[in-house]
Amino acid sequence: MDFNSWNIFWSSAFGLLAVLIILGNFFSICVFHRKKSRKRSYFLLISLAVADLMVGLFAIPLFIKGSSTEHSYLWRLVSKSFDAFIGLTSIYTLAVISLERLFAIACPLRHRTLTSRNYIYAIAIPWIAAAVFIAVIILKPKGSVKHLSYKFFPFLFLITPLLTMCVAYFSIWIKQKSTKGIRNHRAARESKLAKTLFLVTGASLLTWTPFQILNNLVLFQVFQISLTVFYLSKILQFSNSLTYNCTLPTSCSFEQNHLIVLRKQLLTNMDFNSWNIFWSSSFGLLAVLIILGNFFTIWVFHRQRSRKRSYFLLISLAVADLMVGLFAIPIFIIGSTEYSYLRWLVSTSFDAFTGLTSIYTLAVISLERMFAIVCPLRHRTLISRNYIYAIAIPWIAAAVFIAILILHFNGIMKYPSYKIIVLLFQTTPLLTMCAAYFSIWIKRKSTKGIRNHRAARESKLANTLFLVTGASLLTWTPFQMINNLSFIEGWRISSTLLYLSKILQFSNSLVNVVIYPLRIPEFKTTLKNII
């Protein structure tokens, strides 16, 4: 993997950072907005959180889009301008916060007389200053700002908030030192908040400064930097929007209390017997993991030149599991949020189709492994057409079952017949797998110690696929048992148990992704090469 060019690693790193920034700053805004007492003191903190929230919502996505593909000059100008605007707004807001803290500690009586209008002015100044800076950037290419002044103007805009913060916090330190031991409760509270915001400021500057230094060195043509260093410094710069959320909960007592209260409310007020944000998040996260894992699995097996036919069935299994993440889980989530008969029918049918395809493919894989070990010479004569038939059978069997399912739900097929057919479709792959792996065990026991290299390799693959099959059945069986029990009169299954069994059933599509890297050498080698 070339880290000096944009790739999936950088996309994932910046994307994850954007999500964390959005969640963290949205939570901070909610916390400060709900705080009734001393609400004016938190106006500037809310403004800072809004600026940081915009980094996750706009600045990072624009940066990812601009880095991943070639764009016009106008696109690059918009991306860089927005990045600089938000970053400078955040730093200037920290500078204004330092001045507000200085005023609160040095002149406490006058600080209490400040009105909301004063805070509105204080909030507006950083945004206006950042907008002026962006105007300078935009005017420069048109020749309205001369090159020399353009070089020093950004330097002036960057050094001003830094000097302001240094002077303000140094003055606070002098004031606290001179009044040590004679402060009242209010003064102590203001002092503690000043220390907390000093930590926030320090952490922000530590993450923000490296990129600014590199940027100025390039601007003054001191030297060129590699893209790896550039991307790392950008990650550090953007993480400036996250330091605020990491520092406050550890230093600010009311935020700690608010976190505890929210956690208690979440656990006590959330009804897990009805669909809620917890279940949506759980199923959504599972869908993302299934999609990424199985997409990677398909790509790895597709690249294997040797023994490629042996992996045809594994690719088919990964495709079925991929469809669980792409379609089955999203349709299940949509159907659970708002009920209608059509949504329920589509969700149930697609869920059963992908699940049964996966289980029947595992059954066919077990037969293929049995054939490879019991009849190795005949197994080598198999052609691609045989594997195509083997791949098609599970999909056709699942489609037939869905047709029967729809006929039953529309009243065409009667209940007793439907119940027998469902039981038959469920037990057939299970019995097939048991018989196949038992035959493999008998064969290996009888030929122990006389196997060649190829036979040992086929045997190892059989062991791996037996583990995949066993893990899949362990995750798939609980929901099927609960589903069959619901046919019995008097049995009522709670929604919580149903959702948990569905999560377990859907995670059946993830077990192969976990086992393959541990057991298949080609898979492990490809994974190491990518990392």
Image (cartoon, rainbow, N blue to C red):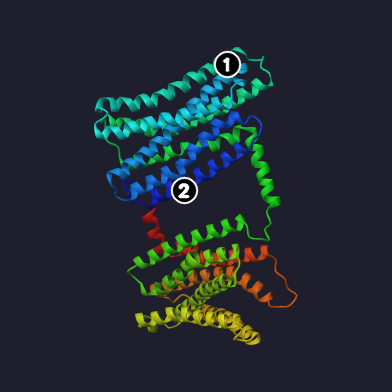
Asked where in the image residue 473 lies, by quadrant, the reply is bottom right
Q: For numbered disc 2, what is the local secondary structure?
A: helix
Whether residue 442 is visible, yes or no, is no
Q: Position of residue 436 (x, y in %)?
A: 52, 80
Q: Position of residue 64 (x, y in %)?
A: 38, 47
Question: Which labelled disc corresponds to residue 406?
Answer: none
**Looking at the picture, which amino acid does disc 1 mark?**
Ala
Q: Which residue is pictured at 41% across the width and 82% down the height?
A: 389
Alpha carbon separation for disc pair 2 and 1: 41 Å
Front residue of 169/143: it is: 143
Q: For numbered disc 1, what is the local secondary structure?
A: helix
For residue 43, above or below residue 401:
above
- Residue extending furthest front? 117
Q: Position of residue 171 (x, y in %)?
A: 52, 16
Q: Which residue is mark 1?
A: 106
In this image, 157 relative to 202: left or right?
left
Asked where in the image residue 348 lies, by quadrant, the reply is bottom right
Q: Which residue is pictured at 46% across the width and 48% down the height?
A: 16
Q: Which residue is pictured at 42% across the width and 32% down the height?
A: 88
Counting residues from the start of the chain, the first of labels 2 and 1 encountered is 2
Q: Residues within 10 Å of mark 2 (few under 14, many from 20)?
A: few
Question: Which labelled disc corresponds to residue 16?
Answer: 2
In this image, 253 relative to 322: left or right?
right
